[in-house]
Structure formats: structure tokens, C-alpha cells
Image (cartoon, rainbow, N blue to C red):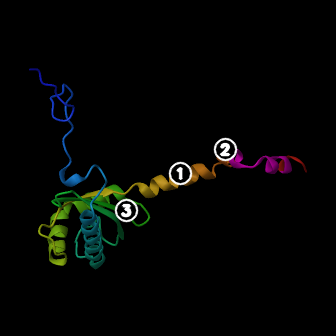
Amino acid sequence: MSRHRSSRGGRSDEPREPRPRHGRRDLGPSQRQLRVGEALRHALAEILRRNDIRDPDLEGVSVTITQVKPSPDMRYATVYCEPLGGQNAKEIVAALNRHKGFLRGEMGHMIATKFTPDLRFVEDESFAEAQKIEDILKSPEVQRDLATPGEEEDEIEP
């Protein structure tokens, strides 16, 4: 007797996609990641506000922590930061990465998590990107294209 294979239980020549754990399918960060990221951001902002780091590159510099994204296992966190005014951003981010061990230790005293994540500081380029888009929107070429037909005729006639 021959058996028919159903589409559910039978073998297929197509490779199967790995099943997501806990039913999550690239839905973005979990609520726990968002909550921990915000707690880390507040703790880092407080530590930097106290100005406990002795580094010439960070002396007198105000740094904004815009976002902290912890990894799903909470072992690592990417810290997006921007110095006030945006000057010397590369040097300031490098200095923060040099002192990430100190910052991690200070954060460990301030937040109640099983592990304090290993930090990686990167420059937040969203401000520069927003400024670039704003400059493009204010350019004469775009303004001309956005003008309504009635406005152009009014400008031509004296």
C-alpha cells in the first residue's frame, strides 16, 4: 500500500526557516530591552553629569546620551551619544570607549540587573541626518517645486 505524504508532516526539498524563539519574529526590541535600555540611558547620563571621568578629551564637554540599545541577552549595549554642538564627536566617542569599563562599574552600582552590559559607544548621526534633510527641504530647487501654481504667477507679475 502506498502512503501519501501530507504537506504538514512530509519531507520537503526546500530548507526550513528556523523557528523563532518565544513566538517573536523580528518585531524589534522587547519591552524588557526597552525598559533596560532606558534605565541604562538614565544611569549613564547621571554618571556623565557628575563628571567623574578624568580625561582631557572629556573635560568640560557635555555629552547627550540619545539612546541605549541592549542586545536580546542583555550582555551588550550600544550607546548612541552626541556631544553638545557636535564638535569633536569622534574624539569624544573614542574617549568614552576608553573609559567604558569605569562607566560599566558605576552603572552596576546604580541599576538592578543580573548583568551590567558591556558598553559600546557610537556617534548618533541622526541629528546630522535631520539637518541634512532640513537643508535639502529649504533649498531653492525644492521650494520652487513645492510652490503652488498660483504663487509662481504672482511672483512673475510686478
Check if residue 51 falls in the magenta segment.
Answer: no
Nearer to us in this view, 33 or 59: 33
The residue drawn where x is 26% and y is 72% is 39
Q: Earlier in the sequence, mark 3 or mark 2?
A: 3
Q: Amino acid at mark 3?
A: Glu
Q: Is residue 19 above or below residue 77?
A: above
Numbered circle sitting on residue 133: 1
Q: Amino acid at mark 1?
A: Ile
Span colored in magenta: 144-154
Which secondary structure lies at badge 3? strand
Q: In the shown orientation, is residue 67 left or right of residue 1?
A: right
In the picture provided, is 110 more to the left or to the right than 126? left
2 and 1 marks in contact (CB < 8 Å):
no
Q: What secondary structure characterizes most of the magenta part?
A: helix
Residue furthest to the front in view is 1
Residue 69 placement (x, y as % from top left):
27, 60
Q: Nearer the viewer, residue 26 or 74?
A: 26
Q: Quadrant of residue 76?
A: bottom left
Q: Which residue is mark 3?
A: 82
x, y (%) of residue 120? Answer: 23, 57
Whole-number angstrom distance, CA of label 1 to CA of label 3: 18 Å
Residue 125 vs 52, above or below: the answer is above
Of 101 and 98, nearer the camera is: 101
Q: Residue at x 28, y 77 (%)?
A: 46
What SS does tag 2 mark? helix
